[in-house]
Amino acid sequence: MPTLLLVDGSSYLYRAFHALPDLRNSAGEPTGAVRGVLSMLRRLESDYKAEYRACVFDAKGKTFRDDWFPDYKAQRPSMPDDLRAQIEPLHEAVKAEGWPLLMEDGVEADDVIGTLTRQAVAAGWEVVISTGDKDLTQLVQPGVRWVNTMSEEVLDEAGVTAKFGVPPNLIVDYLTLIGDTVDNVPGVEKCGPKTAVKWLTEYGTLDNLIA
């Protein structure tokens, strides 16, 4: 059974930039995020012997979510210049390391990863999703694992339930209730994680809860 390794490059780019010190080359150009992401890709290659793999990044420009909800991510400050300067060199380095690099206009890296995961599962493949983004835990199912290389956390279905209090198929309902301050998405007022888990445990789904 083939394994597909999907890496959320945009998630790791931000995390590596903020986690590593201000590293620079002899020309004074910032290199910390590039070094951090490449180190993680090499480690993933070593840890997961996948026949197929891809590193996925957000494309430039707006996505369909901005049309749905104009305030989506509106609170985020603009990207630091030192981070922006590393994007193109990182893309080139990823390709030089032999990784297919994917970016699709109008959607986020998450959407590409979700689509490829569904296609791989339908073909009977196993999938390893490497990211720090909790939203992608909704994709976990038999044969699909969520891996955060930076925290060394690996989640299967039982792991997602233990971490959030709900199984993967209820992660979207859970996040809808609590909201997501990182993406500037409002939830239900005064509904935190404990209340969301309590309601979903009692009513099963968001639709039942609303009814």
Image (tube, rainbow, N blue to C red):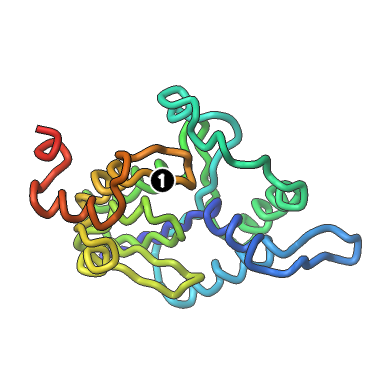
Depth check, front residue: 109 or 190 = 190
Side of 117 relative to 58 (left or right): left
Residue 16 image position (x, y, % from top left): 62, 63
Q: 80 and 61: which one is in front?
A: 80
Q: Position of residue 72 (x, y in %)?
A: 48, 33
Residue shown at 24% from the left, 44% from the top = 173
Quadrant that contains the C terminus: top left
Q: Give the x, y percent position of residue 99.
A: 55, 58
Q: Residue at x 35, y 63 (%)?
A: 146
Question: What quarter of the picture does the N terminus occupy?
Answer: bottom left
Picture residue at 68% right of the left edge, 53% below the top:
92
Image vertical order of residue 106 relative to residue 147, above or below: above
- Point 37% across, 59% down: residue: 4
What residue sits right under mark 1 in the picture?
180
Residue 47 percent location from the top left of the image = 44, 77
Which residue type carries mark 1? Asp
For label 1, the SS is loop
Q: Is residue 49 left or right of residue 163?
A: right
Q: Is residue 73 above or below residue 94?
A: above
User: In the drawing, does residue 167 fall left or right of residue 14?
Assistant: left
